[in-house]
Image: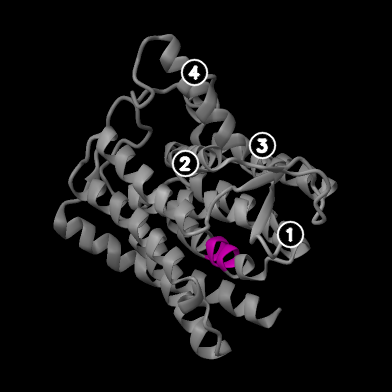
Amino acid sequence: MLEYIALFISSIFFTVATVPLVNSAGIKLNIFDKPENRKQHKNEIVRLGGISIMLGFLVSLFLLDIFSKSSIIIENRVLIILITCFFLLGLVDDIKRISPWTRLVIEIILASLSWINNYGIYAFDFSFSSTPQLYYELPLFLSFFITLVWIVGITNAINWMDGLDGLASGVIIIAAFGMILVSNKFGNLDEIYFLVILCGVCLGFLKFNFYPSKILMGDCGSYLLGFCIALFTVSGSTRDIDSIQNLSSTSILIPALVLFIPLFDMARVILSRILKNKSPFFPDRNHLHYLLIDRGLNHKITVITMYIFSFISFLLLALII
């Protein structure tokens, strides 16, 4: 327990400590998110806050390895490389805009590498129990396809959630805390370390990102957080069912419930855009949080309302597992 507390505190500390430095660098480099009709903020704001989130994430893992004499970095080196790649993809987009289709192709490549390295959905069941009952082993092509859709979909869903100050950070905190409970029940202890860090870096960043925001996480932050929560909601709710065949099963309803709000928002926005004969990547104000604002709620109340929606999903999960 002390390990988790220390990890949580360190991730908060290093994120908070680096935000002012990152903000100053963003100002000097003139890397701002500029106001436009679709966005809520009226002033230019630095959009490199994801760098602080990444620093808090990596430094906390490094300290965990040193003081607990664990080898979590070596054992999860491929995972950490993939997380870093998603972060770098977002960072490049923050500095020099990349077309949506180019980003999508790179995301698919990285998600494919995740699947190849056993970070995917290979079998699933509809039980909330840590002891699988009836499970369905997916054919390889279906396992690959579902994993790609999940990782790419959730990564972009969290990116779209980052439309209001503090929204994405708060939603991730609630989802990560829910997955800590699930991972503990399922015996996935390594996932708990990562999820505790996610809670810490998001809470530390929220100090500067809650309305009115002093800095934005940018695509580098939302891609990092989106990929992490996509992966850990799956791995945290997965258990081994055949050690000889190295087969594991994912309790698929758990990730869907934990991330219900981002999933619901993404599904309805994509469907709406397709019905209007627009690209699924066409930016608009049809997201749930924008609709709440357009109905008369102010910025802060809208974000808190979205927190409440996410917390209801968390409560349902806590009652079921």
Main structural element of the magenta stretch: helix, strand or loop? helix
Query: Dot 4, crowdedness within 10 Å: few (<14), some or many (≥20)?
Result: few
The residue at which mark 2 appears reads as 148
Q: Amino acid at mark 2?
A: Leu
Query: Dot 2, crowdedness within 10 Å: few (<14), some or many (≥20)?
Result: many
The front one of 115 and 140 is 140
Q: Amino acid at mark 3?
A: Phe
- Which label is found at residue 90? none
Q: Which residues are magenta?
A: 194-200
Above/below status of 242 relative to 315: below
The residue at which mark 1 appears reads as 181
Above/below status of 205 relative to 264: below
| Precedes in sequence: disc 3 or disc 1 | 1
| Precedes in sequence: disc 3 or disc 4 | 4
- Which label is found at residue 271? 4
Asked if one can make out residue 193 in the rendered structure from this viewpoint, the answer is: yes
The residue at which mark 3 appears reads as 309
The quarter of the rendered structure image containing the N terminus is: bottom right
